[in-house]
Amino acid sequence: ALMGGGGNSLIVDGGVETLVVDTKFWPASSWQRDWIISHVRSPVTKVLNTHYHYDHTRGNYLYPGAMILACTGVGEWMSDADGPWWKKHPGGLPTSETSEKDFELWSGAVQVLIHNPDMGHTHGDLWVHLPEADVIATGDLFFHNYYPFFDESANGTSLSRMIATLRILADEHPNAIFLPGHGPLAKATDVRHYAEYLQFLKDAVQKTIDAGLGEEDAVTTIDLSQWHLKKLPSVSGWIPKWSGASQNIREIYHHLKNPVSK
């Protein structure tokens, strides 16, 4: 696991080839590529993107010749969200997209199971399981110890489905090591705790809507301090911002009032 610098990344060295799950963005994407060259004995032949966001995908082009795998629609959404970058780096767009729900991939001798929850953090998420090591890379389905970012675009977050997926992950993989999209390594109990946060947030915001309160009222009346989460820097439309309590409340208020998908 190579942490931070964008999304967390999973490096799977199969002895004769290597799989990279999420490739960060500059400059950490270049640091990661250099680290792999220095420390991993086999070439990168496969890249997998857990979803389309720039902080997980912009380093794709640094692995020329590798198959770049993503969920169906991800290449289009990458171009829609980040067109100028991908026009300069077209070799980083997915070379293979899939709508399969569950399938197997091999990185040399290492079995890699890929799962598509249909919708979650975005409309095109994949999560990765290494069954022999019992390691799961969730992408941004799971933020650990940080306030999450919710994608408000037409291809964005389905909160209810994300909560359901997290509960399934925690229940079906009680002993796994979880690599979140952001934050430190975690256990199933941490995944379940995050699902509880999302459910609390959803219910609290829905109560304010049902009571006829506006967005500003929701921000001032909902207290998220009990969850002890930290702010996370992010970018929306190239405008820097912090993903924090008020931002989470605003995003879920918009999500529930005008849902792309609940």
Image: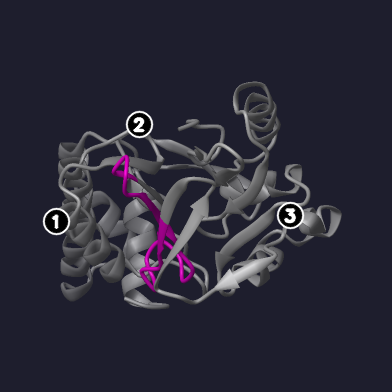
Instruction: Verify whether residue 191 appears in magenta.
Output: no
Residue 190: image location, x then y, percent? 20, 41
**Is residue 84 in view?**
no
Q: Residues within 10 Å of mark 3 (few under 14, many from 20)?
A: many
Magenta part of the chain: 113-135
Q: Residues within 10 Å of mark 1 (few under 14, many from 20)?
A: some
SS category of the residue bearing label 1: helix
* Pointer 1 or 3: first along the chain: 3
Residue at (79%, 56%) from the top-left corner?
Answer: 91
- Quarter of the rendering containing residue 257: bottom left
15 horizontally vs 206: left or right: right
Q: Closer to us: mark 2 or mark 3?
A: 3
Q: Closer to us: mark 2 or mark 1?
A: 1
* Pointer 2 or 1: first along the chain: 1
Residue 32: image location, x then y, percent? 63, 30
Q: CA distance from mark 2 to mark 3?
A: 27 Å
* Residue occupied by mark 1: 171
Which numbered dot is residue 92? 3
Q: Closest to the observer: 76 or 32?
A: 32
Magenta region's main secondary structure? Answer: loop
Residue at (15%, 38%) from the top-left corner?
Answer: 226
Residue 195: image location, x then y, percent? 21, 54
Residue at (78%, 53%) from the top-left corner?
Answer: 85
**Is residue 157 in view?**
yes
* Residue occupied by mark 2: 184
Look at label 3 and name its amino acid.
Gly
SS category of the residue bearing label 3: helix
